[in-house]
Image (tube, grey):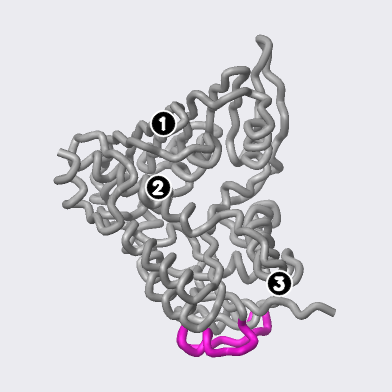
Amino acid sequence: MITPVGVGIIGSGFMANTYAEVLTNHVQGAQLVAIAGGTRAPALAARYAIASVDTLDELVARPDITAVILAGPEYLRPEQATIAAAAGKHILAEKPMATSIAACDAMITACDAAQVKLMVVQSQRFRGVHQRAKQLITNGTIGSVQEMRIWSLFPASWSIPVVALRPWYADPAAGLFMSQGVHNFDLLRWMIGSEATTVYARITSYGSHNIPNLSAVAIVGFASGATGQVWINMELPDTAFPDSQFHSQVVGSLGLLDFDGYTHLDYGHAGAWERVWTQPPLNPMDPLDAIRLESFAGQVQAFIDAIRDDKPLLVTGDDGRAAVELCQAALLSAQSGQVISLPLSRSTDHAEAIHNNH
């Protein structure tokens, strides 16, 4: 019998509940061992009959833990990753992996030095709709990608409570914009299959809620020649647009794709549209929704398999960094009114990048 990979979770909130359920009931070859972090950790640990420990140091000191999942606030992840890597633990980091490219680089460096794996959560890559859309692009069904746009639109009645529960989302240097944006920019980069070279963005807020950066439009140029567009609005009035949480449209040289991560995938060619796949209904706000959990189970399974079989990671630290870099470049562009060239300097902060791109 093969010994399962022992896993510890850092954090005890919504996403920790997600990973506890996934590890216990949806992933093969892994065993949830302990949880650390937050006042809710003892109750969550008790629900799954595992250990609750007080500190990260206690968690990573356990010999029965091989890997950790960083499921707490993103501003804590660089230090947590450094501690876990130094203890020889493989790491699955929630998104965004950090709030700046400098912090991302520190995490990557720490894991490289310790020779441990660093995977970054990009759950939308593992949604059934997005997996199938990517396959159609990869196998050449729609030809070469020329343009892609993706939009995520939410009412203010969703965003304001989220920021109230997670005050760090009010940080104008990252905030709720980056937490959402890393999904959108990662999907854009992954689907197009090329690295971004330029970003031009306008980012603002329109409401009286005093939450920064809830409305954004960004144009991204890619090395392949493709053009991408990201539209994020998290302050709609109470009525939301249908099929608009992760909606994408792709123009290929031979055909078109129209898809939403929570509803459908359509393929347009020869003057007609074909429904390729319909996503079964899911509740994205329920951490135990079985359909919602499929994408997280897929990513955690890939992480466990990479550890057990020394396989390549499907989402690397560099991928996580690239998504943060695109968010950071968009914020820089909005602040400066300039087109921002990529890559950003490894040591660049916002003020320096604005200065360098004037």
Could you say where residue 305 lies in the image, as x and y percent from the top left? 70, 64
Is the N terminus in the top left, top right, bottom left or bottom right quadrant?
A: bottom right
- Which residue is identified by label 2? 157
Q: Mark 3: which amino acid?
A: Thr
Q: CA distance from mark 3 to mark 1?
A: 38 Å
Viewer can see residue 288: no
Q: Residue furthest top?
A: 271
Residue 251 counted in the magenta span:
no
Q: Give the mark toward the camera: 3 or 2.
A: 3
- Which residue is identified by label 1? 229
Proximity of marks 2 and 1: CB atoms separated by less than 8 Å: no
- First in sequence: mark 3 vs mark 2: 3
Q: Which residues are magenta?
A: 46-65
Q: Residues within 10 Å of mark 2 (few under 14, many from 20)?
A: some
Instruction: Answer above or below: position of 11 versus 139.
Output: below
Label 1 residue SS: strand
**Quadrant location of residue 5?**
bottom right
Could you say where residue 2 lies in the image, as x and y percent from the top left? 80, 78
- Which residue is identified by label 3? 24
Q: Residues within 10 Å of mark 1 (few under 14, many from 20)?
A: many
Proximity of marks 3 and 2: CB atoms separated by less than 8 Å: no
Q: Mark 2: which amino acid?
A: Ser
Could you say where residue 177 lies in the image, as x and y percent from the top left? 36, 48
Label drawn at residue 53: none
